[in-house]
Image: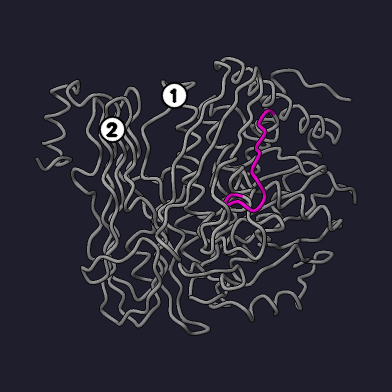
Amino acid sequence: MTELDAITLEIMRNRLEGIAEEMGQVLVTSAYSPNIKERRDCSTAVFDADGRLVAQAEHIPVHLGAMPEAVRAVLDREPEPGDVYVLNDPFAGGTHLPDVTMVSPIAHEGTVVGYAASRAHHADVGGMTPGSMPAGAREVYQEGLRLPPVPLVRGGEINDDVMTLLLANVRNGTERRADLRAQIAANERAEDRINALIAERGRDRILAAFDAVIDYSRDRMAAELEALPDGTYAAADALEGDGVTDEDVPIEVAVEIDGDRVSVDFSGTAEQVAGNVNAPFAVATSAVYFVVRCVTDPEIPPNQGCYDPIEVDIPEGSVLNPRPPAAVVGGNVETSQRVTDVVFSALAKAAPDRVPAQGQGTMNNLTVGSRTSEGFTYYETIAGGFGARPDKDGMDGVQVGMTNTLNTPIEAMEAEYPLRVERYALRPDSGGDGRFRGGLGVERAVTVEAAATVSLLTERRRIAPRGVAGGEDGATGENLVDGRPVPAKTTREVDPGTTVTVRTPGGGGHGDPAERDPEARERDRRDGKVVR
């Protein structure tokens, strides 16, 4: 087997990660929907011939940590060179139905040397409400078209039967077709670039590089874990209802660090629920991977080697490992955030100087759409406060935890949809006070200028993001329709002229507020961050 020296390893690692990033650029620039081209709610990655993650773009954590399950599901179908498989089934490699994944072999001279994978959140995949994010869903069938791994492309040719079936079951078929073709193009770019790399460096060296970058990440992750104190660290939190009832849904975890390995056990977590906050196993595991990477060294190259020292145990039939036909659309976007919070809280006991106070802990999902085949469907997640860190304030108005999307620019939103933005601003005093203040949430008010269906999937409307080490909690969020409060999870029909307002939570504070630097306190008042 070809061995790589340290310099060649670093060059090859960057080349492979560059290919994954270029895939993402192709997807973003080729897509039609603002959700992908503006918000960049998509992810891309390269895998080896055994389905091991080799390189990923720095996109969406909840997509990327779960993507290996999708690749494994496709490998079971024994794809051939020139095939592209499409899937979204949460119980067969997917996360939730709007996240559509494409996996295709990367072939060199007729031999499969790896796989390209792209995942993108499509603004509609059918189901009971426009936008496919219904707050009241009780089973996955209500959430949209469910696709097990099926060949959308065979031998380089679009499978018209599959494409026709897919487009017949979604709204905005023209937009969906364009976005699907953008994903195909992204995967094709990976094959082109890997083959160019093989031509330059030789196949044996490229395959050796796949192994070497994985081994390198595994060794670095093991060393980071070994530096943490051994022990078992527990934490608990809760979701604010499941969309069917308002009863809290407990999430409990015990994290055991033992030398160069970590075991994460979710025994004690609630059983699966009637509503849609159930999270597939791959989603919960993805959240765990994200936290462990944050608490160790985020600069470790993200690939299969990072995840090998991490074991995750979740009881089957729980809210984090549900059985079909559980509804799951909120699990990917909201429950993943709570898993992140609870695992951070546990690991803070082992590494308090590496863990911030809680951030907003929600993606604040807003979906607006019309009930026509070629109407409009708009979806976005809205930023909020980042928790204060042990040595600095939290950031204002950013995506937190398992999402890494941008906002939709007002100009793009108003040009593409019958929507008008009335207000978009930071929320003064929403960050928890402390030696270091939590980041501010935002207020986004949107007037819907056509009859539409509005769905909200949000959290932290009752249970505030916690401050730590004496810091105060961040402010809770609030949802309003024409100025009247509505539940955290709701779907309703609205008339033209209705204004939907989402006020997002702030981050928790860190440390005793009495210890805050007086100059920082004065700066808070000058910048309008506090109202008292």
Q: How is the image coloured?
A: one colour
- Residue drawn where x is 49% and y is 27% of the image: 347
Residue 35: image tag: none
In the rendered image, the quadrant that contains the C terminus is top left
Contact flag, marks 2 and 1 (Cβ < 8 Å): no
Magenta-colored segment: predominant secondary structure: loop
In terms of depth relative to the viewer, which is nearer, 57 or 491? 491
Disc 1 crowd, CA 10 A, few/some/many (<14, 14-19, 20+): some
Q: CA distance from mark 2 to mark 1?
A: 15 Å
The stretch of residues the image draws in magenta is 309-320
In the rendered image, the quadrant that contains the N terminus is top right
Disc 2 crowd, CA 10 A, few/some/many (<14, 14-19, 20+): many
In terms of depth relative to the viewer, which is nearer, 206 or 300? 300
For badge 2, the amino acid type reads Gly
Which residue is disc 2 drawn over? 509
For badge 1, the amino acid type reads Arg
Find the residue positioned furthest to the left: 532
- Looking at marks 2 and 1 on the same chain, the residue that comes earlier in the sequence is marked by 1
Residue 221 occupies which quadrant of the picture?
top right
Magenta-colored stretch includes residue 311: yes
In terms of depth relative to the viewer, which is nearer, 274 or 63? 274
Which residue is disc 1 drawn over? 354
- In the displayed structure, 180 sits above or below 362; it is below
- Residue 404 x, y percent position in the rendering: 47, 46
Magenta-colored stretch includes residue 79: no
| Helix, strand or loop at mark 1 | helix
